[in-house]
Amino acid sequence: MPEQQPNNPLHGVTLKTILEHLVDVYGWEKLGDRIKINSFNHDPSIKSSLTFLRKTPWAREKVERLYIKSLKE
């Protein structure tokens, strides 16, 4: 049985859920201003962004940090 992670705000949250939340909160334009990646700034879509984020650890880390920050606001 997996251990619970009550102090980990990312536990059990999919990357898609994180990205959809950020788009709802900030919109693509502001999200692209905060995190400079092409999939947010040029013809943005959830699908293309997920593909990039799954292959690019540094970008995923930035998205996860922004998600955590947005939950605190």
Image (tube, helix red, strand yellow):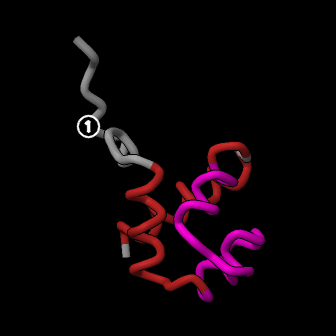
In the rendering, at what x and y percent does residue 38 appear? 77, 71
Q: Dividing the image into 4 quarters, which one contains the N terminus? A: top left
Amino acid type of the residue that numbered disc 1 sits on in the rendered structure: Pro
> Would you say 55 lies left or right of 20 here?
right
> Residue 57's spot in the image, x, y percent?
70, 44
Residue 72 in the image: x percent, y percent? Answer: 36, 68
From the viewer's perspective, is residue 26 above or below residue 55?
below
- Magenta segment: 29-53
**Residue beneath the point at 32% across and 40% down:** 12
User: Measuring 63% from the left and 62% from the top, which residue is drawn there?
Assistant: 48
Relative height, residue 49 to residue 57 (above, below) = below
Residue on which the image places disc 1:
6
Q: Label 1 crowding class (10 Å Cα cut-off): few <14, some 14-19, many 20+? A: few
49 or 3, which is in the foreground? 49
Looking at the rendering, in which quadrant would you find the C terminus?
bottom left
- Based on the displayed image, in which of its 4 quarters is residue 39 positioned? bottom right
